[in-house]
């Protein structure tokens, strides 16, 4: 039987929904015991033999996962969780309320940097004036990192109010998403569902259909799904389940500095080539840690998180 190329647009457990070039979607399962395909993967799939599909509830098998450009994932002591593959960018959505964890934000940014994926940061609920002002101030290092001029900023940080100014936010986001595949990542309560439904009208209905097809029912929150924003299918949005913890056990402690742009900018000036930036004399990184609102400075909070992560990953290395 002939094998056709397709795109994985949803996954739950070992089952996937694969979209072929003509836009038709089919449920497929991987050949063999181990499921390796994730949303965003290009795969070669094969239709089930006549009569066979009804017995399994499947319409085909995934024969091969084609080479990936990248894979975005997290790893803790227990397991590895893959979010999606072949991404252009990750939109990290946080909110003024509930108060976001800067540690989890840093972890997600590090994972994106390590995978070579461009991160965007969006702070939702700007209609909550006081909490938003405090959260926006906490993001000062991220809004200015790399230089004072907009063109030099390492991260793009966007203010949103999805429930109050959805149309304005949609118009601001669409040019940043156009022609790209973007994963939306964020903790529960940040507004991911609101954002997806704003950008993809009917997304909730699609999710229901996919969940029903994959027999996941009440487990919709564990299903990762890809939606097309445009009819030409050039702009994709991938919604992922909310998370509370973001493990980085797939990285070595010595990887951290290069994945934190404010630290990487100064690491080359250290006296010792293998400086950990924690206690060595002549450390150019430690010399830049400051509360001052200077685009070249390293905030004490980010430096503290760097130290905590270095210790955490040093433990897991042995």
Image: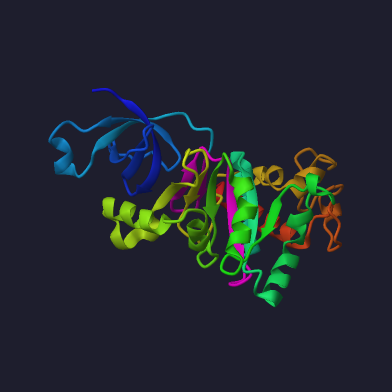
| Residue range highlighted in magenta | 71-99
Query: Is 202 on the left or on the right of 52, as rendered?
Result: right
SS assignment for the magenta stretch, majority: strand
* The quadrant where residue 100 appears: bottom right
Residue 68: percent from the left, percent from the top?
A: 49, 32
Q: Which residue is located at x 71 percent, y 77 percent?
A: 130
Q: Which residue is located at x 64 percent, y 58 percent?
A: 122
Residue 35: percent from the left, percent from the top?
A: 34, 40
- Nearest the viewer among 173 and 186 is 173
Q: Is residue 168 above or below residue 134?
A: above
Residue 312: percent from the left, percent from the top?
A: 60, 55
Q: Which residue is located at x 55 percent, y 46 percent?
A: 182
Residue 132: percent from the left, percent from the top?
A: 68, 71
- Nearest the viewer among 255 and 206 is 206
Query: Is 84 on the left or on the right of 299, as rendered?
Result: left
Locate the N terminus and report the quarter of the image it occupies: top left
* The quadrant where residue 160 appears: bottom right
- Nearest the viewer among 199 and 291 is 199
Residue found at the far bottom of this picture? 130
Q: Which residue is located at x 63 percent, y 46 percent?
A: 175
Q: Is residue 88 above or below residue 223?
A: above
* The quadrant where residue 126 appears: bottom right
Residue 104 can be seen in this image: no
Residue 133 can be seen in this image: yes
Q: Is residue 122 magenta?
A: no
Q: Is residue 73 magenta?
A: yes
């Amino acid at each position: 039987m002939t094998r056709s190329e397709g795109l994985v647009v949803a996954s739950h457990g070992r089952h996937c929904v694969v979209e072929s070039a003509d836009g038709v979607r089919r449920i497929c399962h991987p050949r063999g015991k181990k499921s390796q395909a994730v949303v965003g993967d290009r795969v070669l799939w094969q239709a089930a033999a006549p009569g066979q599909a009804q017995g399994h509830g499947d319409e085909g098998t995934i024969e091969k996962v084609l080479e990936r450009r990248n894979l975005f994932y997290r790893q803790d002591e227990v397991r590895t969780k893959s979010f999606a593959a072949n991404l252009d960018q990750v939109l990290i959505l946080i909110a003024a309320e509930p108060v976001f964890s800067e540690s989890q934000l840093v972890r997600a940014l590090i994972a994106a940097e390590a995978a070579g994926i461009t991160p965007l940061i969006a702070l939702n609920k700007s209609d909550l004036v006081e909490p938003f002002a405090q959260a926006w101030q906490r993001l000062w290092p991220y809004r200015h990192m790399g230089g004072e001029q907009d063109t030099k900023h390492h991260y793009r940080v966007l203010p949103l109010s999805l429930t109050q100014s959805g149309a304005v936010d949609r118009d601001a986001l669409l040019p940043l998403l156009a022609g790209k595949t973007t994963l939306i990542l964020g903790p529960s309560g940040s507004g991911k569902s609101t954002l997806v439904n704003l950008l993809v009208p009917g997304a909730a209905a699609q999710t229901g259909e996919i969940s029903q097809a994959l027999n996941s029912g009440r487990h919709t929150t564990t299903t990762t799904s890809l939606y097309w924003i445009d009819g030409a299918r050039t702009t994709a949005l991938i919604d992922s389940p909310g998370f509370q913890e973001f493990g980085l056990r797939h990285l070595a402690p010595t990887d951290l500095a290069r994945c934190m742009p404010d630290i990487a900018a100064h690491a080359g000036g250290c006296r010792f080539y293998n400086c950990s930036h924690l206690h060595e004399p002549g450390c150019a990184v430690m010399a830049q840690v400051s509360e001052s609102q200077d685009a070249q400075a390293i905030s004490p909070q980010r430096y503290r998180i760097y130290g905590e992560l270095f210790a955490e990953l040093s433990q897991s290395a042995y």
